[in-house]
Image: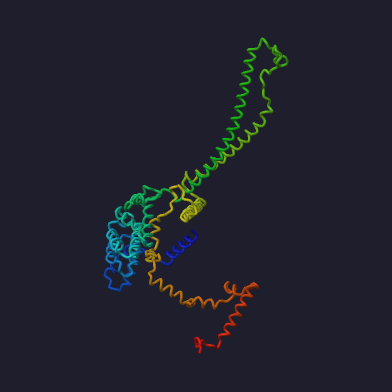
Amino acid sequence: MKKKQRISSERNDNLNYYSPLNALTDAQGFAEKLFSRLQTCSERFEIKMMMVKVVARTVGLHRLILLNFYPFLQKYVQPHQRDVTNLLAAAVQACHDMVPPDAVEPLFKQIVNQFVHDKSRTESIAVGLNVVREICLRIPLLMTEDLLQDLVLYKKSHEKAVSSAARSLISLFREICPSLLIKKDRGRPTDPKAKPKAFGEVTVPSDVPGAELLLDEDDDVSNASDEDGESIDADISTQGGSESEEEEEVDDDEEMGSEEDEVSDDDEEEVDGMSIDSRGSEKRKGQKRKFEDFDGELDGANQSLRALKRLAGARLESEATTEEPTTDGILSNEDFQRIKELKAKKDAKVALTNHGILKKSSDPKSTVFKVPTSDQLSLKRVDGYSLEANIRKKMTKEERKALIKAGREDGEKYQSRAATKQKKTGGLSNQQKEHKKAMPLAAKRSKIERSRRQKKLKAKTAGKQFRGRKAWK
């Protein structure tokens, strides 16, 4: 997030200091004059492309309406056109929500028909799907249900560039308008009834953007305090319940004592507050509780009442502080700083959710894919390189062979196994160590005897030739 903030601040600084398009007094007149000169221009192609980029950038930055610019670009939208990605980037840059969809629809259909079809190359299909996604991000009313379902089928392509471009289109329409997708591709959208705004519809904010984050934070704090209060009330209720139960027991004992007194008045005689019946058994008339028994309970009740008073005072203070911004609608500098911090926390949570570090919450407000606003899109500069398929394609057999040969040139030449063994340095191999093992004594003697016999045999036959059997006379 810090990296994104730094890049955005650098871009804003560059826009403020180095972009003269922000300082135009009559942007509409400038764009119309430059476009009329472009239509009658006889300069070379590079000059025309620079003029197209300046016109598109001006239209997108100031959200101008230049309806003749889109049919002019339609003539050059071909896969074999020179610098076609820069031309498509200019077409995307010139689209915004204030342009009527009918004016951009012929250009949109031309891009789909020329780039996205089965006989087209992989690179052109991927570029066409990326351009469709960027245009629909700015003008979502151009997309129809049948066209979207046809484009979504490219997610089954074996080419990684095409399938990823189609899936990015699906993820966009899951947030913008899930009803255009079939049920299988919708997933779990955050707002199933979301629809794009009608042409010319504007949402006017009625309060400070981000003020609801303060209210949500206050609700969390109040819920936590409510939980604490409920736990304290529960403790008090249990203590009060025990006290009431004891009081009820005392009342029951007194009632039972009075009944017994009424029934056995004739048989009992009172002696010093003690009732003695005719049988000689002693009973208490009505046991009265001593004040010493109430001391512990009264102390516990006083402590719980003090806690309740503190909690009530804290609630009154929190309500007084929270009612200040809601009643008069005026926020202090501390509130704006707190809103900025809460926004940063929310963005960090979304980023961690995207990376799989945090689990996706069930809160519908926490969207994983954040659709940028029209103002952010107008400030964003579209590059032709971002529309290309930046995924490495598979190498052919000849390319793989060339890569292998290039790697072999840097390394050593191929040699036989025997040659590599001869050049081996270090210790002996296991086979060589077997040859040098000390033999047992019997084996040594047999080997010596065998070598002697071989030497004797060789000495007898040495220098003599066999001439056949001699004839006896």
Residue 59 showing in the rendered view = no
Q: Position of residue 6 (x, y in %)?
A: 48, 62
Picture quadrant of residue 31 = bottom left
**Which colour scheme appears in the figure?**
rainbow
Closer to us: 58 or 328: 58
What is the residue that sits farthest to the bottom in this orientation?
A: 473
Question: Which residue corresponds to the image point at 64% horizontal and 15% vertical from the top-left?
Answer: 260
Picture quadrant of residue 25 = bottom left
Closer to us: 72 or 468: 468
Q: Position of residue 390 (x, y in %)?
A: 40, 65
What is the residue that sits farthest to the top in this orientation?
A: 266
Residue 436 vs 383, above or below: the answer is below
Question: Which residue corresponds to the image point at 63% horizontal and 12% vertical from the top-left?
Answer: 263
**Number of marks in picture:** 0
* 283 on left or right of 132: right
Q: Position of residue 65 (x, y in %)?
A: 31, 60
Picture quadrant of residue 262 = top right
Question: Which residue corresponds to the image point at 39% horizontal and 57% vertical from the top-left?
Answer: 375
Q: Position of residue 449 (x, y in %)?
A: 62, 77
* 409 on left or right of 287: left
Closer to us: 284 or 340: 284
Question: Which residue corresponds to the image point at 61% horizontal and 35% vertical from the top-left?
Answer: 304
What is the residue that sits farthest to the front in this orientation?
A: 473
Residue 96 vs 299, above or below: the answer is below
Residue 195 showing in the rendered view = yes
